Structures are given as structure tokens and as C-alpha cells.
Amino acid sequence: MSLADQFAQDQQGRRFSDVMSDPRIDFAKVLDFFDNSDRQRRMVESEKFHDRPALAGVIKELEEQLYVKAFFENNDGHTTRRFRQAVGVIGRIIMENQGWKTTGRTGSLGTRVKVPAGTTTPGAYHNTGGLSAWFTRAERYEPA
């Protein structure tokens, strides 16, 4: 079964139909990005060998995709929140398929820049340090 089908049938994933149909981001491309054995291997290795969240293994490459980069640069952090949550669900589905389970803990991917509360300036909610430019935390996993 494809990752797109798994996401659509997942108890959490199906709650993100708004993200899957959002015209500002081609979510099918995001699912195709993650539906790759090399990237999935890097996610497992990130947890197993580097003591980092699984998403740390692919987050830089994801954010370099032009469609992802444009989405973050042209929308405010409140708008991108659901997308970032959906990416977390994709990560969980992949890691569970690889024989891992959630720990209930998160690990850092970056440090958010300080902006006034309620800021709606596109691209304002970015990170000043860490691996990721846009994601601050991600779920940690352990072998099931």
C-alpha cells in the first residue's frame, strides 16, 4: 500500500484532509518525497545512530524542495502549522512501518526566532539555529 493510501486511512492522517486539499502546497508531492526507501532508511538511522528525531534525517532535504520552501516563505506560521503537523503524522506512519513506536517525547529540530505574538508576516516564523529552518520539534521513536 502506498504511503498516500496509508496516510488517508490512518486515524490521524485522515483528519488532515484540509492539508491534503490545500492548493498552496502539493501534498501529494510531499507524500511522494517520503515514499522513498532511502529517505525512510535515513529516518531510522537518525534515531538509531545519531540520537536525533527521525525527521532530522530528511528535514533539510524536505525544506530544500522548491514547493515546500515557497509554501513556508509565502505563508505565516499559523497557516503552516497544520502542514507541519501532517508531516509529523507521515513520520509516525513511516517509523511504525519500520518497527518503531512513539515515545511521547520530542526532540529539537531548531530554535524559533522571536516574533511578536500574532504576527502574520509570511515567513516570519523561521528558525535561527538547528537543523531545520521551519520545524522546531519532532517526535522521538524507539524500537517496538
Image (cartoon, rainbow, N blue to C red):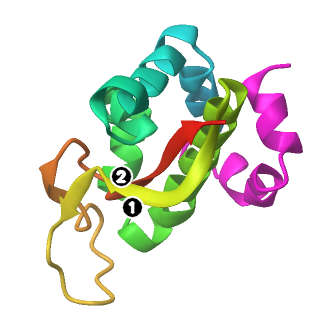
Inspect this view and state whether residue 26 appears: no
Q: Is residue 143 left or right of residue 8?
A: left
Res. 72 mark? 2
Reading the image, the residue beneath label 1 is: 75
How far apart are the alpha carbons under marks 2 and 1? 6 Å
Q: Is residue 42 above or below residue 111?
A: above
Kind of residue indicated by mark 1: Asn
| Rendered image quadrant of residue 85 | bottom right
Kind of residue indicated by mark 2: Phe
Inspect this view and state whether residue 83 appears: yes
Q: Is residue 53 left or right of residue 141?
A: left
Please give the name of the residue rendered at 74% of the width and 26% of the height, measured from the top-left corner: 3
Q: Is residue 24 above or below residue 38?
A: below
Res. 46 mark? none
Please give the name of the residue rendered at 67% of the width and 36% of the height, measured from the top-left corner: 144
Magenta part of the chain: 1-26
